[in-house]
Image (spheres, helix red, strand yellow):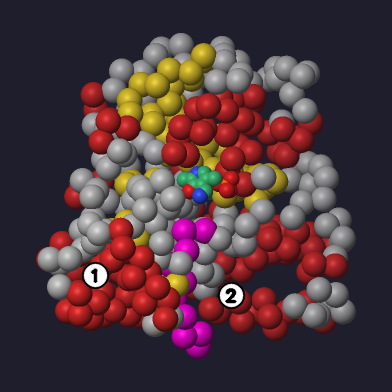
């Protein structure tokens, strides 16, 4: 057992069992005489890894046949622009702005069409999610974009907007596979894998084929076209083979944990332990509207930046690492993704109690 608990927002902690398995298979993958890193992506041994990875994801999320799974380079940020290049034939889309990443997604999309900001929570520094029942969507919008879990600010959509049939596209980078997902509610879900799924380097999308227009401008580079990935099973060029293999180990681990409902129950328990402690604490507070709190990213502050710094330093001395908040908000943030065990959150709460006693 490793004794450090890593609260990084991403790249983030991976399940210990997965890292053990990867280390056992590192030099010689199951008698093949090769490391997965050394294999041709077109070899039958790698093809088996790749197909099993997709099959296990399909099982986990219950993905219907009209949805495609694609792995793309460049993480979520590359997809911000690709979404607009591929899915905006009428050159218009609606964006809900709930943080830094939804802003960036909208900025990229603006390069390719007219972007309507239909709601925003910037007025209160993104500490809440706008009431989705009050949002008016534009009938001509090609899609509606949300960032479902806001990594920096610690908010999460608990209810999806009713978009009246306009495809909903969700950036799930920081809540991917943390709870059951009904993909039929979305035209597309996507995210960088480096928080809940695997090492950095890949964007994972699950996309309804019906929302991809038949004609896409010839000006869109081949590597930016979703049909390139769909038609070539994400292997038009050499994909990040090792990262995809690691994602596959995590999918298998999630199935062994009992699937997404089981992991959701664990995530609720972990988050509740931390929020309950913060809510009764005289020292620490969480700025987020209670109904909109994320189960994955929990920001908190003491109210005194010097004391926050002391907390982060002393926590690190106690093997609780990467607790500094994002530079945009300061303070602390505990990212408690699927791979964070309950014992890690318990250790954090125990340390917060001790710190509070000593610094009141
Ligand atoms: N969306 C969200 C919600 C994120 O948290 C991040 C990264 N922290 C991104 C997008 C950008 O992801 P990437 O670094 O994979 O491009």
Magenta residues span: 1-10
Q: Earlier in the sequence, mark 1 or mark 2?
A: 2
Residue 183's spot in the image, x, y percent?
A: 46, 42
As drawn, the residue found furthest toward the front would be 306
Q: Within the image, what quadrant is residue 280 found in?
A: bottom left
Decide whether residue 56 is among the magenta residues.
no
Which labelled disc corresponds to residue 18?
2
**Residue indicated by mark 1:** 273
As drawn, the residue found furthest toward the bottom would be 1
Task: In this rendered view, identify the residue nearer to me: 82 or 2.
Answer: 2
In the rendered image, the quadrant that contains the C terminus is bottom left
The answer to whether mark 2 is within 8 Å of ligand 1 is no
What secondary structure predominates along the stretch shown in magenta? loop
Q: Which element is circle 2 on? A: helix
Name the residue: 65% across, 51% down: 202
Classify 10 Å Cα crowding around label 1: few (below 14), some (14-19), many (20 and above): some
Name the residue: 20% across, 75% down: 359
Left or right side of 64 for 134 = left
Q: Is residue 236 visible?
A: yes
């Amino acid at each position: 057992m490793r004794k450090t608990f890593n609260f990084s927002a991403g790249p983030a902690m991976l399940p210990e069992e997965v890292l053990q398995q990867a280390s056992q298979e590192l030099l010689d993958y199951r008698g093949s005489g090769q490391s997965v890193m050394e294999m041709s992506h077109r070899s039958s041994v790698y093809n088996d890894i790749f197909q099993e990875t997709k099959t296990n994801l399909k099982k986990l999320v219950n993905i219907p046949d009209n949805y495609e799974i694609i792995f793309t380079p460049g993480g979520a940020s590359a997809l911000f622009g690709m979404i607009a290049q591929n899915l905006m034939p009428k050159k218009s889309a609606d964006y809900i702005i709930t943080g830094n990443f939804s802003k960036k997604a909208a900025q990229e999309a603006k390069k390719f069409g007219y972007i309507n900001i239909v709601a925003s929570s910037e007025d209160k520094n993104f500490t809440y999610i706008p009431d989705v029942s009050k949002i008016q969507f534009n009938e001509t919008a090609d899609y509606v974009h949300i960032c479902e879990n806001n990594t920096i600010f610690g908010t999460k959509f608990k209810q999806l907007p009713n978009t009246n049939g306009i495809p909903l596209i969700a950036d799930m980078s920081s809540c991917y596979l943390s709870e059951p997902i009904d993909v039929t509610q979305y035209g597309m879900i996507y995210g960088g894998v480096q928080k809940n799924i695997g090492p950095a380097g890949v964007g994972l999308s699950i996309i309804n084929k019906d929302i991809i227009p038949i004609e896409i401008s010839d000006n869109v580079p081949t590597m930016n076209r979703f049909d390139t990935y769909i038609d070539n099973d994400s292997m038009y060029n050499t994909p990040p083979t090792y990262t995809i293999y690691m994602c596959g180990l995590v999918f298998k681990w999630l199935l062994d944990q009992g699937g997404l409902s089981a992991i959701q129950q664990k995530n609720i328990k972990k988050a509740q332990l931390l929020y309950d402690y913060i809510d009764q604490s005289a020292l620490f507070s969480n700025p987020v509207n209670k109904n909109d709190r994320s189960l994955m990213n929990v920001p908190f502050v003491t109210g005194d930046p010097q004391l926050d710094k002391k907390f982060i330093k002393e926590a690190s001395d106690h093997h609780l690492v990467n607790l500094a908040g994002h530079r945009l908000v300061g303070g602390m943030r505990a990212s408690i993704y699927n791979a964070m065990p309950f014992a890690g959150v318990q250790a954090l709460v125990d340390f917060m109690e001790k710190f509070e006693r000593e610094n009141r």
